[in-house]
Image: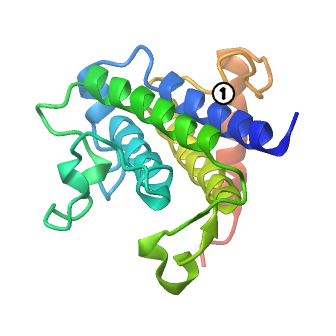
Amino acid sequence: MDEKATLLRYLQVHRDALLWKLEGLSEREARMPRTPTGTSLLGIVKHVASTEAEYLGLCFDRPWPEPMPWMDDEAEPNADMWAAADEPMAEVVDRYLRVQAHAEATVAALDLGAVGRVPWWGEQGEAVTLHRVLVHLVAEVARHAGHMDVLREGVDGAAGMRRDVSNLPGEDAVWWAEHVARLRAIAEAAPAD
């Protein structure tokens, strides 16, 4: 497998995990803020779609053709991190799938050494290669997939790295409850200062 295909494979694994973490959730569950900063599962998918559209679109003179008003300079802060009332989950997911296709077309059209510009990186973004941007995106999407792992587990206990490989011991609910109780006891016995 060549380097470009390897980078795309790892990126796709994390993209798939993001969408898997939405499966089976209601609109309400997907939108519900789950952190003090308002992070939601659906908001993360919207953010990652916006991010990919910018990095593998705008940065390489292949702008995403659809409006994303939440990314405008005039948009309210953090507007890419939550879905508005008129943005159903199906629409956010569909947009992300279209962004992925647009991003993959950019990658297919360019060599890994192709030079782009990431304006929000300042001087460091003046001449970046497609290779560097892809490495950055793999890390960025993986980071957000990790956020979604934790948030989704808090919703309904659904856990695991991928649909086909949970990466967790295959124990039953009783074992997990006892395991967590043991860890809680260890934590509570530790000094609080």
Instruction: Please identify the quarter of the rendering in which residue 149 is found.
Output: top right
The answer to whether any part of residue 105 appears in the image is yes
The foreground one among 84 and 95 is: 95
The foreground one among 141 and 31 is: 141
- The residue under the point 42% across, 73% down is 119
Left or right of 173: which side holds 60?
Answer: left
Report how many numbered discs are placed on residues in the image.
Answer: 1
Residue 52 at x, y percent in the picture = 47, 47
Instruction: Please identify the quarter of the rendering in which residue 175 is found.
Output: top right
Residue 178 at x, y percent in the picture = 70, 29
Asked if residue 179 is positioned above or below residue 22 in the image, the reply reads below
Asked if residue 53 is positioned above or below residue 172 in the image, the reply reads below
Query: Which residue is farthest bottom?
Result: 123
Left or right of 99: which side holds 107?
Answer: right
The foreground one among 129 and 173 is: 129
User: Which image quarter holds the C terminus?
Assistant: bottom right
The foreground one among 66 and 167 is: 66
Instruction: Please identify the quarter of the rendering in which residue 182 is found.
Output: top right
The coloring applied to the image is rainbow
The answer to whether any part of residue 152 appears in the image is no
Asked if residue 173 is positioned above or below residue 14 in the image, the reply reads above
Residue 70 at x, y percent in the picture = 21, 52
- The residue under the point 31% across, 50% down is 81
List the residue tagged with mark 1: 160
Q: Residues within 10 Å of mark 1 (few under 14, many from 20)?
A: some
- The residue under the point 50% across, 50% down is 56
- The residue under the point 51% across, 40% down is 103
Secondary structure under badge 1? loop
Left or right of 63: which side holds 158?
Answer: right
Query: Which residue is farthest right?
Result: 1
Q: Amino acid at mark 1?
A: Gly
Residue 68 at x, y percent in the picture = 23, 47
